[in-house]
Each structure stands twice: as structure tokens, then as C-alpha cells.
Amino acid sequence: MRRLRPQLMRLARFSGVGLTCFAIQAGILLALKGSGAPGPVANAVGFLASAQVNFLLSTYFTWADRRSPHVPWPRRWGPSRPPSR
């Protein structure tokens, strides 16, 4: 049972991040549609905001124990570059 505890905790954190990001996207979508924005635009804005929150929460909450110390998160946030020779 002790070996399952870290896996269950990670699953709980992963689920919590997913539900939080869903709530953010749905909340933004509903708020923007309620204010008269077109559905696709409201959905895109909600998705973009949710994706950024998901990245940060996953970095600092879900996968904090697997963070690579030599790659800061702003570099991972941007576009990836091919390795230099």
C-alpha cells in the first residue's frame, strides 16, 4: 500500500489540475458568450487561458518532483529549438 500512495497522490493532483483547467475554460467560454462574443472566439480564448494555467499547474504541482533543474520553465514554455551541434 505504501508504494501505491505516491501514485494515487499524483493521480489526485493530475485530476485536480484537469478539473481546474476545465472549469477555467468553461467559465471563460460562458462569460464571453454571455457578453456577446462569437462561440469560436470565446472557446479559443478559454482554451488558450486554460492551456497556460495547465502548464504552470502541471510544472509546479503535478510534476514538481520531476522538474529538470537545468531547463527553466520559461524556456520550456516557448517553442522548442533543435539541439545545436
Image: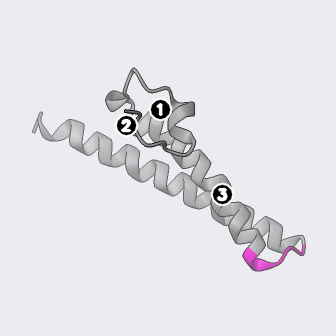
For image coordinates 15% across by 41% down, the residue present is 4
**Image quadrant where residue 83 sits:** top left
Q: Nearer the viewer, mark 2 or mark 3?
A: 3
Instruction: Give how far apart the Cα atoms at labels 3 and 1 are.
Output: 19 Å
* Left or right, 13 with reference to 79: left
Instruction: Give how far apart the Cα atoms at labels 2 and 1 are.
Output: 7 Å
Mark 1 highlights which residue? 60
Instruction: Give how far apart the Cα atoms at labels 2 and 3 are.
Output: 21 Å
* Left or right, 85 with reference to 44: left
Residue 85 placement (x, y as % from top left): 37, 33
Assign a secondary structure to mark 3: helix
Q: Mark number for residue 70?
A: none
In front: 26, or 54? 54
* Left or right, 85 with reference to 48: left
Mark 3 highlights which residue? 48
**Image quadrant where residue 30 sits:** bottom right
Assign a secondary structure to mark 2: loop
Residue 71 placement (x, y as % from top left): 44, 27
- How many residues crowd mark 3 within 10 Å: few (<14), some (14–19), many (20+)? few
Instruction: Identify the mark nearer the N-term, 2 or 3.
Output: 3
- Whether 39 is among the magenta residues is yes
Does residue 56 appear in this view? no
Q: Amino acid at mark 2?
A: Trp
In front: 43, or 31? 43
Whether residue 83 is situated above or below residue 28 in the rendered picture: above
Mark 2 highlights which residue? 63
For image coordinates 80% across by 65% down, the residue present is 31
Does residue 11 appear in this view? yes
Range drawn in magenta: 36-40
Q: Amino acid at mark 1?
A: Tyr
Location of the N terminus (image quadrant): top left
Q: Count numbered badges in the picture.
A: 3
